[in-house]
Image (cartoon, rainbow, N blue to C red):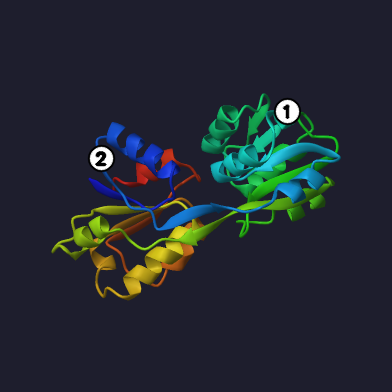
Amino acid sequence: MKVWVTRAEPDARRTADALKAASHKPLVAPLIQVQQLPAADALAKGLAGVGALAFTSANGVRAFAALRPISDRHLPAFTVGAATARAAREAGFVTVISAEGDVTALAKRIAAKSDRPTGVVLKVGGLEPAGDLVGDLEQRGLSARAVAVYRTAPMAPSAEVLFALQQDPPAVDAVLIHSPSAGRQLAKLLETRSGLAGALTVICISKAAAEPLRPFKFTRRAIAATPDEAAMFARLQP
C-alpha cells in the first residue's frame, strides 16, 4: 500500500521506516513543521520547585533537551506514550514513566500513588496543546504549570505528493494523520480538489486529529483504537 506520511520531521522518517518494515510504500511529504520557541528564560524560572516533567510529544522532549543542560535530566519524565518515552530516553532522562495512552491517561499516571511526584509538575509542550493536562492535574490535587517550547507551522504539499494526487486514480492509497494540525492542513488541500477525498483512505491517530476531516467523504476513514502508531498501522487494512 502506498501511504502518505504527513507528520513533521524527524518523526516522519521513523514512520516511513516502520511502514517499510510492514511491507508498505511510504511517501514522506509533511504538511507541518516544528519550530522551536525561545522559551529558555521561562524554563530557567520554571524549574525552580519542579518535581517532575510531563511530555505529550517527542517534539517537546527534543525542544527541552535543546534548551536545557544535561544536568536537568535527573527529573523524572512522564510521557504520554512509547514514542515520547523513547525520545526522553534518547535525550538522557534516567527515569521515564510512560502512560501508554492519551492526555487523560497521562494525568492519571502522574497522579498515581506509586509515582506521584512531590513539587510542581511542569508540562513541556507545544503552543497549541491537545487537552488540558495542567487543569486535569490540578483537579487531582497536584501543582502544575506549562511552558510552550515549540509550535507547529503549516507546510505546502511537496511537488511529489501533488503529482501523486493528480493521477487518476491517485498514486496514494492512504494518508496518515498524526495530529489536529496535520488534519487541518489536509482539509485545506482537499477543499481545493473536489472529489479527491473519495479516492483516499485516511487513518487518524485520535478523534481530535480526525475532527478537521469530518466534512469529507473518504473511501474509508478510521481512527486508531489507541493513540499510537501501531494502532494506526492496524487500521491500514480494512
Residue 224 is situated, as x and y percent measured from the top left of the image, at: 44, 48
Q: Residue at the far top: name it.
A: 94
Q: Secondary structure at mark 2?
A: loop
Location of residue 210 (image quadrant): bottom left
User: Compared with residue 197, is residue 58 higher up or lower down, i.e. above or below?
Assistant: above
Q: Which residue is mark 1?
A: 71
- Specify whether 238 is left or right of 48: left
Q: Which mark is residue 13?
A: none
Q: Nearer the viewer, residue 92 or 85?
A: 92
Q: Earlier in the sequence, mark 1 or mark 2?
A: 2
- Specify whether 178 is left or right of 29: right
User: Compared with residue 63, is residue 192 higher up or lower down, i.e. above or below?
Assistant: below
Report whether residue 79 is seen: no
Other residues around mark 2 within 10 Å, as few (<14) / some (14–19) / many (≥20): some
User: Compared with residue 23, is residue 37 higher up or lower down, i.e. above or below?
Assistant: below
Q: What separation in Å lies between label 1 and label 2 (alpha carbons)?
A: 41 Å
The structure residue drawn at horizontal position 81% and vertical position 46%, both measured from the top left corner, is 45
The structure residue drawn at horizontal position 66% and vertical position 41%, both measured from the top left corner, is 67
Q: Amino acid at mark 1?
A: Ser
Location of residue 186 (image quadrant): bottom left
The structure residue drawn at horizontal position 30% and vertical position 64%, both measured from the top left corner, is 218
Q: Secondary structure at mark 1?
A: helix
Q: Amino acid at mark 2?
A: His
Q: Nearer the viewer, residue 211 or 237?
A: 211
Residue 96 is situated, as x and y percent measured from the top left of the image, at: 65, 29
Report whether residue 96 is seen: yes
Residue 122 is situated, as x and y percent measured from the top left of the image, at: 75, 44
Q: Which residue is mark 2?
A: 24
User: Compared with residue 108, is residue 187 higher up or lower down, i.e. above or below?
Assistant: below
